Amino acid sequence: MKKRIISVLLCTAMIATMLVGCGGTKESAETTGEESKAATEQEGKVTEAPAQAKATEEASGEAQETAGTFNPDTETDTVAYADLEANYGPLSDLSLPEGVTLGSILKNQANEFWLMLGEGMTEAAKANGTTIDIQATRTETDTAGQLSIAETMIQNNYNALILSPLTNECLDTAVATAKAAGIPIVNANCEYIADCDTFVGGLQIEIGQKAADYIANKIGGAGKVAILEGVAGTFTSIQRVNGFKQQLEAKYPDIEIVASVPADYETEKGLNVATDILTQNPDVAALYCCNDNMALGAVEALRARNMLGKVIVLGVDGTGDAYKSIKAGELTATVDQFPAENGKAAVEVALRLLAGQKLPKVVSTPIEVIDKDNAGQYGK
């Protein structure tokens, strides 16, 4: 394939903030007055109110119902990324058209997880002599803006699209148009696209299961734990929480969940929610946080109480700041999704599809629990 220059275009000015995972930026989205009010009212609650619990239950049910058509976590037509070359041959052996341009839409480009995923895409595209245009909306609530970006990429005749939708349905019309035009669709991580050619990413329910096993082992299989959920109703948060709860119920009956509260994937909300949990449950043994930002907020809540090291805190995503905190003896662990590798895998899958290969519906990328014992093995 002929080498071309990588073109990575920022959609608009990004918010200069740090770190979250698949859920949102740290203090990222520009909330409306109603959203701000709801967020304020949310803080300080360490158990779900009946209405909130009902809404969460309904959202979970809706996600599972929709997932009856496609759910990456339960799909049987799957292959591990590590086995892709062995099963389908080296990518370098495939014939691709000249001048391939890939389009990628991420959830945002203002946090470390998505920046790392985008960097992996850029590296893989460059290594394979293709061009990739990576864009995102300013906020993770701008579903109309994300749809507009997708429609423009289709109009510009990009050869394949790598999409990380803000919701499970927001890009459906664009996906239908792309499919009708013969444009392959790769669904990269997090929220899913039912009609994608292939989903590439870590399995969210497995994240929760690994977190449960790790925490249970650290606290001796008994004690009180609390959950800091992501954004209520999102697929990633639902699956990470469900995997955690189901694993505890199945294997660790002596562990009690004393609170499960959304903190919206944000550091400050993680701090506030963790503070309230610790106030009402001073004997809690562990905090499971559905991303690293909330986990780092929980670390600050413990620091303020001189309790660092006394409560297990586990996050998700494997951000650089999470690694630093682990190495400093503050954060206990993170479930790393290796976003850069995820990005490389997504580009490889897109190129294989363009070369005419028929791949499984899901290509699962690695996830691993990282703590002080193995953090030094990775260059973060």
Image (cartoon, rainbow, N blue to C red):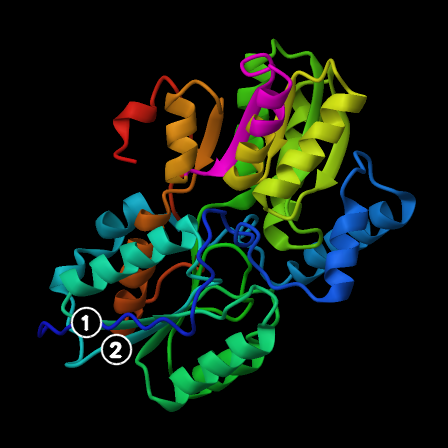
Q: Secondary structure at mark 2?
A: strand
Q: Position of residue 370 (x, y in %)?
A: 41, 27
Of pointers 2 and 1, the one earlier in the residue sequence:
2
Q: Position of residue 4 (x, y in %)?
A: 13, 74
State the CA–CA distance, disc 2 to disc 1.
6 Å
Is residue 368 visible in this depiction of the protein? no
Taking the magenta stretch, the answer to whether it contains residue 336 is no
Amino acid residing under circle 2: Thr
Chain part drawn in magenta: 300-318
Amino acid residing under circle 1: Thr
- Taking the view exactly as shown, the residue that stands out farthest to the right is 50
- Which residue does the numbered mark 2 point to in the structure image? 101
> In which quadrant will I find the C terminus?
top left
Q: Nearer the viewer, residue 372 or 274?
A: 274
Q: Is the residue under label 1 in contact with that under label 2 (CB below 8 Å)?
A: yes
Which residue is rendered at x = 36% and y = 17% of the image? 373
- Which residue does the numbered mark 1 point to in the structure image? 130
Which residue is rendered at x = 70% and y = 54% of the image? 233
